[in-house]
């Protein structure tokens, strides 16, 4: 089974269309109607490269027209930042230099209130171009202008207080290779990522009188899961075993947990772990995109676990599709990635439905995160990263469908205003 569903996005029709609708809602209605209408006479989607200049110009103009209709307030204006047990956000990165040089078309629009529209270029049987607009809605959606701090404020930051109250928090970056997972989680020289931003907030809170009296100690751990095996990134990729104890708690045996007392300590851990992750690789994205990296900030009280914040840079989701290639190694990697991303989705869904049974044993990823994801006081946020270009359209849709399954939020068009 693939980790994404091939179903079309779950977009509910409003109960009644006779109710008053704002222009923006009416536009959404029109998009949804178009979507249904054009499903009848679809030919193969033309690749951007084979598209004539005329066709491409038409597509760009149609996307622009659609955007003009949707133009409203800033997509993230007036959004509440309350912690939620499960929240799912989308982050679209800007077109990169290479895509600009290749004259790639930006086919993703982030609209108000967590709305994301993928303008899929299609061709009718009579060869005329049209847009198949696929509409999704999430807790939040960020476009290419959003900085890491803004994304952080609406995703991981509300969960920092949760860990001071003894809860478990988890933040995933999910998406295609090159869509911005590492940029979001680890950050870059010019922009702090979520690892650093969480750590800063943790140290800040340690100074609050209320939290000071908890007498908490902070530790960091950093490990990677590759081919369903766990490797310690703070201990020269030492292979670690995962065991389940009598209380059904999973333990990563011998995982290095380093005490950190300052941001310098944290940054050193991130650098050590990241360079360990990249060691021996020929190009930046070859191997690291095939493993899940897990950075944990752990709070302890009198030597006992008090709470954990797990920050996860997942393997590129397109790798899960590498199960039909001739290369055996790639095929096996793809199968493991697919299995773990599917298990992750199922575990989060089980949490949402308060199911007694969760398939956490189906992969190492879900096994090691068991207490974080399905504990009674656990909170999870997923940041699904997407590329804007027409060339990535298929992968973008797969990412949005997966995120949609995790979210399971049904759009009520009447609640949009
Ligand atoms: P991934 O980890 O998903 O494979 P990266 O985070 O490595 O992708 O991003 C690929 C490239 O795109 C990097 O050069 C990164 O700096 C850039 N990038 C990603 N997201 C953004 C963004 N939101 N704004 C600016 N640059 C970005
Ligand atoms: Mg990466």
Image (cartoon, rainbow, N blue to C red):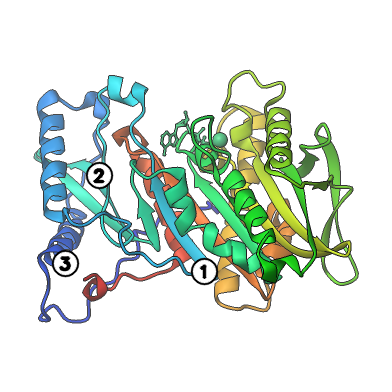
The spot of residue 123 in percent (x, y) is 17, 40
Vertical placement of residue 397 versus 268, above or below: below
Displayed-image quarter of ligand 2? top right
Q: Quadrant of the C terminus?
A: bottom left
The spot of residue 221 in percent (x, y) is 76, 46
Q: Label 1, on which residue?
A: 83
What label does residue 285 carry, if any?
A: none
Classify residue 249 as left or right of residue 97: right
The spot of residue 136 in percent (x, y) is 32, 59
Q: Label 2, on which residue?
A: 120
Identify the mark nearer the N-term, 3 or 2. 3
Residues at marks 1 and 2, CA–CA distance in whole angstroms: 34 Å
**Residue 126 appears in the figure:** yes
Front-lying residue, 195 or 103: 195
Classify residue 86 as left or right of residue 386: right
Residues at marks 3 and 1, CA–CA distance in whole angstroms: 28 Å
Q: Which is closer to the viewer, label 3 or label 1? A: 1
Name the residue rendered at 47%, 33% in the picture. Answer: 178
Q: Label 3, on which residue?
A: 25
**Residue 5 appears in the figure:** no
Q: Which is closer to the viewer, label 1 or label 2? A: 1
Ligand 1 lies under 8 Å from the Cβ of mark 3:
no
Dot 2 lies on which element?
Answer: strand
Dot 1 lies on which element?
Answer: loop
Contact flag, marks 3 and 2 (Cβ < 8 Å)? no
The spot of residue 152 in percent (x, y) is 49, 52
Q: Which is closer to the viewer, label 3 or label 2? A: 3
Name the residue rendered at 81%, 61% in the picture. Answer: 300
Name the residue rendered at 10%, 38% in the picture. Answer: 61
């Amino acid at each position: 089974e693939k980790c994404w569903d091939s179903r079309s996005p779950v977009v509910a029709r409003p109960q009644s269309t006779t109710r008053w609708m704002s222009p923006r809602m009416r536009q959404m209605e029109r998009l949804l109607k178009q979507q249904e209408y054009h499903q009848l006479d679809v030919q193969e989607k033309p690749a951007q490269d084979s598209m004539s200049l005329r066709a491409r110009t038409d597509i760009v103009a149609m996307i622009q027209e659609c955007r003009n209709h949707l133009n409203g307030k800033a997509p993230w204006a007036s959004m509440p930042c309350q912690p939620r047990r499960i929240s799912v956000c989308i982050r679209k990165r800007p077109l990169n230099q290479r895509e600009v040089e290749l004259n790639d078309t930006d086919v993703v629009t982030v609209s108000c209130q967590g709305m994301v529209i993928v303008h899929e270029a299609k061709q009718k049987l009579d060869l005329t171009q049209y847009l198949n607009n696929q509409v999704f809605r999430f807790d939040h959606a960020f476009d290419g202008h959003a900085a890491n701090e803004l994304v952080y404020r609406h995703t991981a930051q509300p969960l920092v207080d949760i860990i001071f109250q003894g809860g478990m928090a988890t933040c995933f970056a999910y998406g295609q290779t090159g869509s911005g997972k590492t940029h979001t989680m680890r950050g870059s020289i010019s922009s702090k990522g979520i690892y650093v931003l969480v750590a800063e907030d943790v140290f800040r809170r340690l100074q609050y009188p209320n939290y000071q009296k908890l007498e908490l100690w902070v530790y960091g751990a950093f490990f990677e899961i590759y081919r369903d095996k766990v490797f310690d990134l703070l201990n020269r990729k030492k292979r670690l075993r995962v065991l389940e104890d009598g209380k059904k708690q999973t333990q990563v045996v011998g995982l290095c947990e380093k005490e950190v007392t300052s941001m310098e300590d944290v940054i050193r851990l991130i650098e050590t772990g990241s360079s360990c992750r990249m060691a021996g690789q020929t190009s930046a994205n070859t191997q690291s995109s095939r493993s899940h990296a897990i950075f944990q900030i752990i709070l302890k009280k009198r030597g006992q676990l008090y709470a954990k914040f797990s920050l996860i840079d997942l393997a590129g989701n397109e790798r899960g599709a590498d199960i039909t290639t001739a290369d055996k190694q790639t095929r096996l990697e793809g199968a493991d990635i697919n299995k773990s991303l599917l298990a992750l989705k199922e575990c989060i869904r089980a949490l949402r439905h308060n199911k007694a049974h969760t398939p956490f044993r189906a992969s190492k990823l879900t096994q090691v995160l068991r207490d974080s994801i399905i504990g009674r006081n656990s909170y999870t946020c997923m940041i699904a990263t997407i590329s804007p270009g027409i060339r990535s359209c298929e992968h973008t849709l797969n990412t949005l469908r997966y995120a949609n399954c995790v979210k399971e939020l049904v759009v009520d068009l009447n609640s949009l205003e």
